[in-house]
Image (cartoon, rainbow, N blue to C red):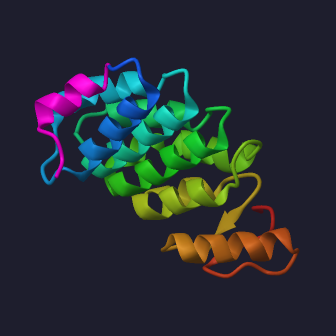
Amino acid sequence: LLPAEGDLLEMLRDPHLETRRYAVFALGQLAAPVQRAMGPLLQLLMDGDASIREAAAYTLGRLKPGGSEPIDALSKALEDGNPDVARAAALALAQWGPAAARAIPDLLKAVQGGETDPWQYPVYALGRIGAEAVPAYGSSSRWQVSAVAASPRSVARSARHASSGSAMNGGIRDEPAS
């Protein structure tokens, strides 16, 4: 049984790491989006602890509270030095689907940079954004898309093929755009 919404929001400010982490994940399990949680969750994307930032990104993806502010914050989190946080931000943007179209430039940057996180998660997010992402992704200097990956499993499979030097599955080819 989860605590009440108000209790969870209060727990987000608790000084104990485990209490904050529990509250963030519990908010993501509520049946209805909690608009009042957006501000605290956005603040937690800048928490000093990476596990809290990761949990906040995950929860913003589950709640999809609306507006451009969460998408902008998740886009910024793609650059987090912790790969788990960057991955959670990409997966959260994927949950937003076409509503996250404003994140396309940052997702492309994550695909091209790929220093802290494998590029497959931003690719998955681009695929969930949909057709609007394909022209931008296809013009990328590093990768070309014939059809964007449809699931995390096919993205992960594609990444394994790419890292082994073989041709990629899922409509993504390991070759520079022409």
x 68%, y 32%: residue: 81
Q: Nearer the viewer, residue 3 or 37?
A: 3
Residue 38 is situated, as x and y percent measured from the top left of the image, at: 26, 30
Mark yes or no: residue 47 visible.
Answer: yes
Instruction: Classify 131 as above or below 35.
Output: below
x 49%, y 73%: residue: 151
Q: How many marks?
A: 0
Left or right position of 163 against 43: right
x 49%, y 22%: residue: 47
Residue 43 is situated, as x and y percent measured from the top left of the image, at: 38, 21
Left or right position of 117 against 17: right
Q: Nearer the viewer, residue 102 or 26?
A: 26
Q: Which quadrant holds residue 106?
A: top right
Left or right position of 19 against 133: left
Left or right position of 19 against 140: left
Instruction: Classify 99 as above or below 148.
Output: above
Residue 161 is situated, as x and y percent measured from the top left of the image, at: 77, 77
Q: Which quadrant holds residue 123?
A: bottom right
Residue 167 is situated, as x and y percent measured from the top left of the image, at: 79, 81
The magenta stretch spans which residues? 1-13
Mark yes or no: residue 148 visible.
Answer: no
Quadrant (top left/top right/bottom left/bottom right) for the C terminus? bottom right
Magenta-drawn stretch contains 129: no
Magenta-drawn stretch contains 6: yes
Q: Which quadrant holds residue 65?
A: top left
